[in-house]
Structure formats: C-alpha cells, structure tokens
Image (cartoon, rainbow, N blue to C red):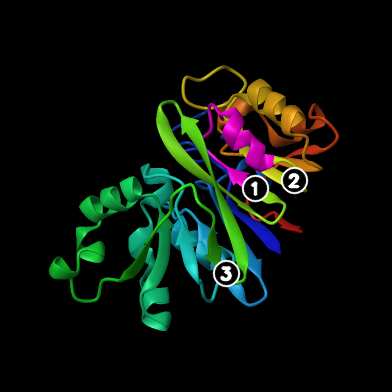
Amino acid sequence: MKVTFLGTGTSQGIPVINSNHPVCLSSDKRDKRLRVSIMIQWDDYTYIVDCGPDFRYQMLRANVTKIDGILFTHEHSDHVAGLDDIRPFYFQIGAVPVYASQRVLDNLKMRFDYILNDENKYPGSPSVIQNIVTLESFQLKNKQVIPIEVLHGELPVLGFRIDNFAYLTDVKTISNTEKSKLQGLDVLVISALRIEEHRSHLNLEEALTIIEELNPKQAYLTHISHKLGFHAEVEKKLPKNVYLAFDELSIQL
C-alpha cells in the first residue's frame, strides 16, 4: 500500500495570503503546504481522504488519472470545498463513491445541493454514491477500514485505519476506546498544528505525547501551520521515529 501526502497544511495553507511570516517566505519546498489530504493506493485502487479547495491542483500535481472514491473526515471547508472538481472523474467512471458520517453527508447535501440532490441536479454536475460511515468497520474493495472517532474541539471527526496504517487529522482529544483501535501500527499520521496550545487542535507537544502512548513504529505529523516553524528546524528536534510530513511525500507500507 502506498500513501501520498497531497497536502499537509492547515485551513489557510502555507504561505498564508498577505503574510510576511518567515515560514511563509521560506524557499524550502517542504514549507509550502496545500490544504490537508492524502491518497491511498493499493493494487489498482486509488482513494482520496478529503478534497479541499486545492483538490484540482493536487490531482494535477500528482498526475492522478482515476479515483475509486473519497473518504471524508468532517465537513469543514478545507476538507470538502473541492467536491465540484471531481467532475473529470465522474465523466470517466460515472458517480464517484463518497464515504462520510450522516452528519457530513447532510452538510454536503446543503452545500452541494446541485450534486447530491437528484431532484435538483444541475446538468453537467458530477454525481456521487453516498455511503454512510458509522464507527463500524467497512470494506473498500479488498481492504477493511476501521473508523476512528476523534474530537476537533467538540466536533466529532473521523480518522481511518487500513491494515497497520492510521490517519487522524484535526485532532484535539481521543478517547481510550478509540485509542484501543490504534494499537500495533506501523505508521500513524496525526495532526500537529503549531507550538502554542490551541482550543481545537493538538499542538506539537500534545501530538508527541499521543504518539508516545500509541507507540507506532513510525509517525508523521500533518495539518501544519506556519506557526509550527521551519520544516528543517522542527524535524531536527523530533524523536527518531517521528517525521514532519510534506506535500508530495510518499510512503510505502
């Protein structure tokens, strides 16, 4: 299985518009981050987790020629705003399967009524096949997916475990019940927004504490803001099995 980081930035991306923060002015390619998303591939299958406002460019940059579906973590714009840009895939394969909680699907129906509402479908707009995700495991082709519920402040957000890989974004807290689903991981991807504490996101110290508790073989940090610091400087200070993810990084499992 191959995982590609399509974007590793927070809701504004890096650089932030009209910012003269040193990280936003960095010439290091690893400090330039699109909105957070990953691509998971195995056999001939390709799935995307979240399609934010950078989705079109992410697909072009990674030369993605087909997708088999999209998994949504939650409904915030930096995770869903690119849904209309699935049109080329719709024209290629027909309705695109999407996987999300009922709450997220209801939100998408309101925001993308012309896509998800068959009675109000706009000519030329894409169609989706809606799959409701609960906390029960489900199948994607020949892989089992285990949903992991975390809290983003007070908002429930879904992470996903496939084999010994798990992806958690927009995390602030994880219950012990959900942590029990994250044992024995080869790779954990988890968000770490910045150095300072935040009311609805893990900061670096909190993310490292969870990583130490879960003890995966490797961990990658994502959903990073410019306030975390320069990639090159931060990574030098991380434990030996923890890395900063960056856009276009691929890992093989």
Q: Is residue 221 visible?
A: no
Upstream in the sequence, badge 2 or badge 3? Answer: 3
Q: Is residue 174 above or below residue 130?
A: above
Residue 201 percent coordinates (x, y): 52, 27
Residue beneath disc 2: 185
For the residue pair 251 and 149, the one nearer the viewer reads as 149
At horizontal 50% and vertical 72% (from top left) the residue drawn is 68
Q: Name the amino acid, label 1.
A: Ala
Q: Name the amino acid, label 2.
A: Leu
Residue 144 percent coordinates (x, y): 60, 61
Q: Residues within 10 Å of mark 3 (few under 14, many from 20)?
A: some
Q: Is residue 139 visible?
A: yes
Question: Element under label 3?
Answer: strand
Q: Is residue 143 magenta?
A: no
Upstream in the sequence, badge 1 or badge 3? Answer: 3
Contact (Cβ within 8 Å) of mark 2 with mark 1: yes
Q: Residues within 10 Å of mark 1 (few under 14, many from 20)?
A: many
For the residue pair 30 and 109, the one nearer the viewer reads as 109
Residue 218 placement, left or right of 30: right
Q: Residue furthest right?
A: 240
Residue beneath disc 3: 46
In the image, which residues are magenta? 166-182
Residue beneath disc 1: 166
Q: Is residue 22 above or below residue 247?
A: above
Residue 183 percent coordinates (x, y): 72, 40
Upstream in the sequence, badge 2 or badge 1? Answer: 1
